[in-house]
Image: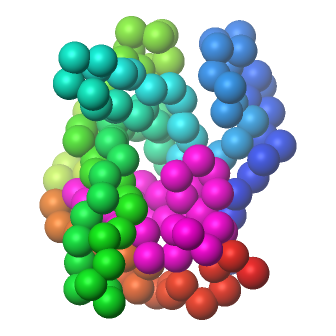
């Protein structure tokens, strides 16, 4: 089945009262077959540097793994266009997620677990898009950067069908 956008997720049931602080607590990208989902939590802005850090979580077999990412424009040889995407900055820890009382850092049991979890997060981001709108044709060529640059083709999907 793969990842799908679920817009009626009961964030209060999972996160408790903390979810009232998150405007997107009802949106997640989930793969039921693999028991994994991601959810956008909040954003941290640095007005001095004009940067934004987005905080998300990967929930995989009940493990809550925070990660931080920023929106970027990257070039890749895809018709010479600049492509919108994400750059994952930290995986498994987020000072902001801890500060808002969501979760602490996650200690991976092995490097293999870290790799599997990070690839699930990267794959899910293609369905998420930029704001839970990964099916929008503007994000058909989206890229995700984390120890390499990935596109939809790296996960056996293509831009065909995106936005339909």
Residue 159 visible in the picture? yes
For image coordinates 67% across by 19% down, the residue present is 19
Q: Position of residue 33 (x, y in %)?
A: 65, 67
Q: Quadrant of residue 20?
A: top right
**Quadrant placement of the N terminus:** bottom right
151 within the magenta span: no
For image coordinates 54% across by 84% down, the residue present is 159
Residue 104 visible in the picture? no
Q: Is the residue 157 above or below the residue 87 in the image?
A: below
Count up the numbered dots: 0
125 within the magenta span: yes
Residue in the foreground of this view, choosing between 43 and 84: 84
Q: Position of residue 157 (x, y in %)?
A: 51, 85
Q: Quadrant of residue 106?
A: top left
Q: Is the residue 102 above or below the residue 32 in the image?
A: above
Q: Is residue 53 left or right of residue 2?
A: left
Q: Is residue 148 left or right of residue 66?
A: left
Q: Position of residue 164 (x, y in %)?
A: 75, 81
Magenta residues, start to end: 118-146
Q: Is the residue 27 above or below the residue 141 in the image?
A: above
Q: Position of residue 25 (x, y in %)?
A: 69, 30
Q: Quadrant of residue 30?
A: bottom right
For image coordinates 65% across by 46% down, the residue present is 28
Give the colour scheme shown.
rainbow
Q: Which residue lies most toward the right here?
A: 8
For image coordinates 33% across by 42% down, the residue present is 70
């Amino acid at each position: 089945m793969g990842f799908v956008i679920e817009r009626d997720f009961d964030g209060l049931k999972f996160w408790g009262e903390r979810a009232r602080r998150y405007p997107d607590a009802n949106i997640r990208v989930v793969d039921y077959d693999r028991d994994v989902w991601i959810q956008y939590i909040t954003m941290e802005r640095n007005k001095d540097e004009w940067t934004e850090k987005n905080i998300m979580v990967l929930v995989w077999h009940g493990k809550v793994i925070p990660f931080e990412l920023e929106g970027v424009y990257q070039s890749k040889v895809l018709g010479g266009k600049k492509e919108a995407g994400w750059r994952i900055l930290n995986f498994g820890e987020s000072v902001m997620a801890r500060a808002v009382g969501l979760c602490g850092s996650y200690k991976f049991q092995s490097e293999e677990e870290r790799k599997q979890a990070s690839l699930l997060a990267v794959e899910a981001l293609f369905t998420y898009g930029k704001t839970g709108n990964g099916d929008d044709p503007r994000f058909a060529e989206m890229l995700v950067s984390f120890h390499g640059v990935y596109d939809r083709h790296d996960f056996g999907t293509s831009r065909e069908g995106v936005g339909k």
